[in-house]
């Protein structure tokens, strides 16, 4: 396993959302982000209008912009989802008077980009190759929303207790823990408009999960979902596993990372169905080993604090996104996305 220099480590940070799964983990209720993803990434008629605090978002406008951006057919629906999410979050930040001014944003982004443009890959190469953004422009839009949230919650100056708590949550990543795991991907069929039939894939995955959960030893191989062994059947660290599953910072906003749930499970645990980038996974953790030569370089106090701060910002940001979707009145073609939760953090714009 390779050691990432600190400059790359900050860009490659995974989100360590730890859970304590049972032996056979059936899926938890979908997060608000995943509910929105199901509407925009799934097949069927495109929604026409999304109403956020009385403001109307016309989905056709997002479709035009996504198609003009180019890329693969399957990228169009995901671009629409990302743009809709950012529009909802931008509206919330304006409502809380927390949106970064143009002047401040330009200055802050230039300082941020400068440190990475000194590397051989440049910032554009780093965010598209490791964070899996389709292009630099998409990253820039997300960065402004994230930094507005960070400033609103003063996460750019976290206290020692917050960083210590984040270090505990991110222990697997920081210490180079590795797992051996096997996966069964039930791929969602791709439609002509670039969307996928995730509903059919989830139904098949649920059937597979029920069969596997009834097995006392190894699950029988499924012809509908061939077995995958990332890392060629050897132990895999968290970041390479995320790459193998097509997960990165870009997709984390759209659905909860599959790799994080796998790393949170103990050997022998069966997990699923879990929504991934192209379908639903069933996974089983075969074995797990402690950290070793793959640890991230955080030898300097300043470097370690910088990495932990980035991990903290990303984790709290995703928590806030779900809170906004829960606490804000959002209607899609007249129907509520989720029932608003009075007094939730999303209604005040503040994270936990």
Image (tube, helix red, strand yellow):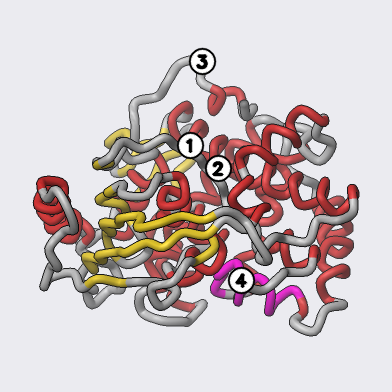
Q: CA distance from mark 2 to mark 3?
A: 19 Å
Residue behind mark 1:
322
Q: Quadrant of the N terminus?
A: bottom right
The residue wearing badge 4 is 130
Report if residue 132 lies within the magenta region: yes
Give how far apart the Cα atoms at labels 1 and 3 are: 14 Å
Q: Are marks 2 and 1 in contact (CB under 8 Å)?
A: yes
Q: Is residue 8 magenta?
A: no
Image side of residue 18 versus residue 188, left or right: right
Q: Secondary structure at mark 2?
A: helix
Instruction: Report crowding for label 3: few under 14, some 14 to 19, many 20 or more residues within 10 A (C-alpha).
Output: few
Of badges 2 and 4, nearer the viewer stands 4
Quadrant location, the C terminus:
top right
- Res. 149 image quadrant: top right
Q: In the rendered structure, are the residues bearing label 2 and label 3 in contact, judged by CB atoms less than 8 Å apart? A: no
Sequence-wise, the earlier of marks 2 and 3 is 2
In percent of width and height, residue 313 lies at: 69, 43
Taking the spot 33% from the left edge, 40% from the top edge, the residue there is 30
Residue 14: horizontal and vertical position, in percent?
59, 55
Which mark is on residue 343? 3
Residue placed furthest toward the top: 343
Taking depth in this image into account, of 37 and 211 the one nearest to the observer is: 211
Q: Quadrant of residue 208?
A: bottom left
Q: Which of disc 4 and disc 2 is earlier in sequence?
A: 4
* Residue located at (47% from left, 66% from top): 235
């Amino acid at each position: 396993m390779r050691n990432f220099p600190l400059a790359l480590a900050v860009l490659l940070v995974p989100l360590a959302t730890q859970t304590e799964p049972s032996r056979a983990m059936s899926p938890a209720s979908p997060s608000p982000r995943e509910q929105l993803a199901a509407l925009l990434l799934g097949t069927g008629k495109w929604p026409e209008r999304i109403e956020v605090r009385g403001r109307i978002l016309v989905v056709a406008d997002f479709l035009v912009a996504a198609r003009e951006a180019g890329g693969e057919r399957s990228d169009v629906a995901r671009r629409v989802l990302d743009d809709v999410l950012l529009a909802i979050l931008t509206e919330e930040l304006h409502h809380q008077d927390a949106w970064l001014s143009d002047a401040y944003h330009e200055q802050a982004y230039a300082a941020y980009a400068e440190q990475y443009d000194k590397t051989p890959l440049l910032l554009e190469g780093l965010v598209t190759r490791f964070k899996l953004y389709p292009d630099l422009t998409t990253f820039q839009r997300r960065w402004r929303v994230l930094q507005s949230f960070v400033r609103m919650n003063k996460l750019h100056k976290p206290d020692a207790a917050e960083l210590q708590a984040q270090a505990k949550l991110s222990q697997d990543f920081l210490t180079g823990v590795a797992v051996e795991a096997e996966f069964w991907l039930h791929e969602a069929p791709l439609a002509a408009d670039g969307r996928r039939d995730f509903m059919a894939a989830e139904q098949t995955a649920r059937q597979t999960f029920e069969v596997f959960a009834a097995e006392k030893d190894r699950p029988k191989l499924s012809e509908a979902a061939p077995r995958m062994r990332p890392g060629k059947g050897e132990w895999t660290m968290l970041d390479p596993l995320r790459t193998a599953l097509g997960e990165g910072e870009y997709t984390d906003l759209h659905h909860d990372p599959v790799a994080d749930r796998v790393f949170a499970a103990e050997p022998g645990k069966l997990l699923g169905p879990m929504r991934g980038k192209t379908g639903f996974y069933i996974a089983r953790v075969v074995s797990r080993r402690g950290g070793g030569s793959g640890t991230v370089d955080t030898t300097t106090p300043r470097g370690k604090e910088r990495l932990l701060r980035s991990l903290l910002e990303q984790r709290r940001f995703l928590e806030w996104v779900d809170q906004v979707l829960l606490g804000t009145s959002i209607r899609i073609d007249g129907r509520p996305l989720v029932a608003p939760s009075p007094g939730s953090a999303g209604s005040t714009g503040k994270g936990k």
